[in-house]
Image (cartoon, helix red, strand yellow):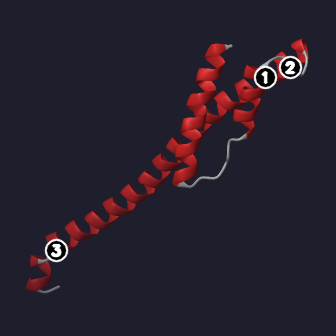
């Protein structure tokens, strides 16, 4: 080892540590993104499942012809698209708001 290598030793360790930190950060960011996506999807579709069960129950108790609000609610729930592009997600958020409002009416 010569004198020039000793002078750049600190810089080499710094660069090595920086690269390791970046790699760890990328891995952690991907993990957090997946966890957030699962949590958000679960929250959205939990409501859809609950409303579907409510509509099924109401139709079984009161018959298929139980009113326009139930028919509209069934139509809203069945019109949800399960794609994952931006426009579909925005449309789904609007549909979920409509579904929540319709459930409040009932």
Q: Is residue 64 above or below residue 79?
A: above
Task: Return the residue nearer the eye: 59 or 71.
Answer: 71
For marks 3 and 1 on the same chain, the one whose residue lies earlier in the sequence: 3
Q: Which residue is painted at 10% across and 84% down in the image?
A: 4
Looking at the rendered structure, which numbered label has been put on residue 11? none
Tell me, yes or no, whether the two marked residues, 3 and 1, touch with CB atoms within 8 Å: no
Furthest toward the front, the residue is: 68
Quarter assignment of residue 101:
top right
Looking at the rendered structure, which numbered label has been put on residue 59? 2
| Residue 54 shows up from this direction | no
| Residue 45 shows up from this direction | yes
Image x and y of residue 54, in percent: 76, 20
Image x and y of residue 29, in percent: 42, 52
Q: Is residue 1 above or below residue 66?
A: below
Query: Which residue bears the numbered disc 3?
Result: 9
Tell me, yes or no, whether the two marked residues, 1 and 2, touch with CB atoms within 8 Å: yes
Label 2, residues with CA under 10 Å away: few <14, some 14-19, many ≥20? some
Task: Return the residue nearer the eye: 46 or 3.
Answer: 46
Image position of 72 (left or right of 25): right
Image position of 64 (left or right of 106): right
Label 1, residues with CA under 10 Å away: few <14, some 14-19, many ≥20? many
For marks 3 and 2 on the same chain, the one whose residue lies earlier in the sequence: 3
Q: Which residue is painted at 55% across and 37% down in the image?
A: 94
Q: Nearer the viewer, mark 3 or mark 2?
A: 2
Image position of 36 (left or right of 49): left
Q: Secondary structure at mark 3?
A: helix
Query: Which residue bears the numbered disc 1?
Result: 55
Tell me, yes or no, whether the two marked residues, 3 and 2, touch with CB atoms within 8 Å: no
Q: Could you tell me how far apart the alpha carbons at marks 3 and 1 are, in whole angstroms?
A: 69 Å
């Amino acid at each position: 080892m010569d004198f020039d290598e000793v002078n750049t030793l600190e810089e080499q360790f710094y660069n090595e540590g920086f690269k390791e930190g970046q790699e760890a950060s990328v891995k952690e960011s991907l993990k957090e993104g997946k966890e957030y996506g699962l949590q958000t999807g679960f929250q959205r579709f939990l409501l859809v499942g609950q409303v579907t069960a409510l509509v099924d129950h109401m139709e079984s108790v009161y018959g298929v012809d139980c009113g326009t609000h139930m028919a509209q609610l069934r139509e809203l729930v069945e019109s949800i698209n399960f794609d994952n592009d931006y426009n579909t997600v925005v449309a789904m958020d609007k549909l979920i708001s409509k579904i929540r409002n319709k459930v409040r009416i009932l």
